[in-house]
Structure formats: C-alpha cells, structure tokens
Amino acid sequence: MGAVTYPNAEVITYLNTELITLRLAPSGPRADAFFIRWTPSLLILDNSGAEHHRQVGFLPPEHFLPALMLGNAKASFARADFAGALTRLERLLAEHPQAFAAPEAVYLRGICLYRTTKDASNLKKAWQHLSAAYPASEWAQRSAPYRLLS
Amino acid sequence: MPPEIKWLEDWDAALAQAAQTRKNIFLDFFLPT
C-alpha cells in the first residue's frame, strides 16, 4: 500500500479531504477490539467508532479509491443518510464503473433510492443494471429476487 | 507526497474530530517494517 497505492495523487486527495486518517499498530487493545489478525487491515469508522467497511489486503489505486468511496457511502447508509450515500455512490459509479466496488455500489444505490422514494422499481433497476453490467458479481445474485418486482 | 496518516494517540479526540468535521475515520492497522 505504501509503495504503490498511497502515493497516488487521487488517493492522497481523497484521504486528505474526505476522511480523518489514522494509523495503529496491529496489536494491542484497540486492535483486539477490532479483531485485527492481518495487515493491511483498513477500516472505515463513523464518529461513534462503529465500523462500516473493512478491506484486508492490498488494492491498487484504481480499486482502492472506489473502495474508500464505498466505505464512506456505507457509513452514510448506516446512519440512514440516504442522500449522502447516494452522492458518494453516484460519484463512485461515474468515475470508477469498472472497479471491484462498483457492483456493490449499484446494489446499495438501488436500496438508497428505494428507501428515499418507496418506489420498488429502483430495486428492479438495480438488478437489471447488475445483470447487464456485472453478471458474474455476487451482487447480481443478491439482487436476483428483485427481478420479480413489477 | 503520501497522505498524512497520523498515529492514533487519543481515541476520544479522534471521535470528537470526526463528529466536528462530519467526516468518517480511515483507520489503517499498520505493521512497521
């Protein structure tokens, strides 16, 4: 991460502007509290200290940056800030549609839109998008029941 | 210039900063080499 991903200009900008960045050794009480057993373990926490996203292992910049965006969106989603989550998900999908994080972002966007509008067609649209663009992803499978919605 | 990732020294202060800035926390469990 330190040799390849952290030096990337876009990663630097995102970390420095969108998140509070902190580092801890992978042993000790705090690491135990988060069940850290391997490095790198990279967590997105909210301001209560609750974990919303975890990455274990290396990702190159083109996948790491959208993973950060997804983590931030998941934290917003967990707080029922669906508008905030949607803003982050739309940016992720516009800028990084081929990222590993993109299929989960499509799924989560569909849920956010449904929770915002109560329009179930958003769930079916998420399945349609996933089936067309990411048919091999697990998120296409997770959304499969939504194909039955009218 | 890599991002400035500071060593966590004060947990409560970090949470307070997150609340004040309305940002989430990126926590990197780092193995020094």
Image (cartoon, coloured by chain):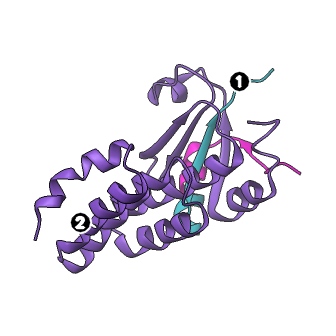
Chain colours: A purple, B cyan
Q: Report whether mark 1 lies on the same chain as mark 2.
A: no
Q: Name the residue under label 2.
A: A123
Do the residues under discs 1 and 2 have CB atoms within 8 angstroms? no
Tell me which amino acid carries mark 2: Leu
Q: Which of A58 and B9 is in front in this view?
A: A58
How far apart are the alpha carbons under marks 1 and 2?
41 Å
Q: Name the residue under label 1.
A: B31
- Residue A148 vs A37, above or below: the answer is below
Crowding near the residue tagged with mark 1, few <14, some 14–19, many ≥20 C-alpha atoms within 10 Å: some
Question: Which quarter of the rendering shows the C terminus of chain B?
Answer: top right
Where in the figure is residue A29, as x and y percent of width and height? 52, 24
Total marks placed: 2
- Residue B33 vs A72, above or below: the answer is above
Looking at the image, which residue is at 39% across and 44% down? A137
Residue sitting at the far front: A132
Q: Which of A34 and A42 is in front in this view?
A: A42
Is residue A42 visible in the rendered structure shown here? yes
